[in-house]
Amino acid sequence: MLPQDIALFVVTNLVQGYDHENVYFLENDLRTGQKLKQRFPEPVSKAEIIPRKVADTIPFSSKELPEILKRLAIEPRSVQAKIVEQTIKECEQPAMEGESKFCATSPESLIDFSVSKLGKKVQVFTTKVDDNSKEPSKLHEYKVAKGVKKIGESAVVCHRQNYMYAVFYCHKIKATRAYMVSLVGAGGTRANAVALCHRDTRLWNPQHVAFQILKVKPGTVPICHFVARNNLVWVPN
């Protein structure tokens, strides 16, 4: 994976369980009546959220992995141990050009990072699927309903990581526009989804699947995708 693709991978880590050809779309697709094929899988991680006073007592560094596993009562050679190690290493990777990043291990630290990047007045959005929707994890053809709303010209996106307790990979990427979109599926499935449109794709790998599917070139048009159900999008209020 090329360096510029690492940031893109993190941005779109919501594609776990998705078909890549149905992830990306263009900004001008966010119009009433437009058809989009999407899936909204169940959240990968539903781990407990713990307060800062507890989270700060638990190490979160690859250098202290043995102590972390001991504190969390995890066998060193287990699958859980590999998950812990992988998540921490992802969090420790350096930020890409134009990106500010932070792994939040508590709600307090999550809010602090968002406020530090966007200002004290912020609001948070997430993708929600109607409780009566039929099999939202399966691929459905949705129509964009009336009332697409632009919610921000900048955003902090927090992706929930696979960990023993709630950890969010938060980052702010330049030139990212956020929308709130109502979607109605043919089978009765309904969703209110956050869409992110990346306006500066000049540094993306020209061979990335988004360009192949949409038949566009880097830096020519915004590339958009929906945010997964357990991710958070913070925007200035």
Image (cartoon, rainbow, N blue to C red):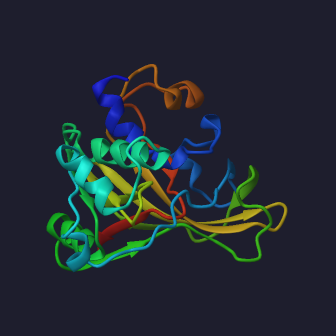
Position in image of residue 152 (x %, y %)? 34, 65
Q: Give whichever of 36, 2 is nearer the camera.
A: 2
Position in image of residue 151 (x %, y %)? 40, 68
The number of callouts visible is: 0
Name the side, left or right, on which 50 lies relative to 60: right
Name the side, left or right, on which 42 lies relative to 171: right
Position in image of residue 48 (x %, y %)? 44, 73
Name of the residue lying farthest toward the top: 207
Name of the residue lying farthest toward the right: 187
Image point 62% across, 43% down: which residue? 18
Position in image of residue 173 (x %, y %)? 27, 49
- Quadrant for the C terminus in the image: bottom left
- Quadrant for the N terminus in the image: top left
Image point 54% across, 63% down: which residue? 229
Residue 22 sits above or below residue 180 on the image: above
Residue 126 sits above or below residue 154 on the image: below
Q: Give whichever of 225, 46 is nearer the camera.
A: 46
Name the side, left or right, on which 172 lies relative to 204: left
Name the side, left or right, on which 37 lies relative to 27: right
Image point 42% across, 46% down: which residue? 83
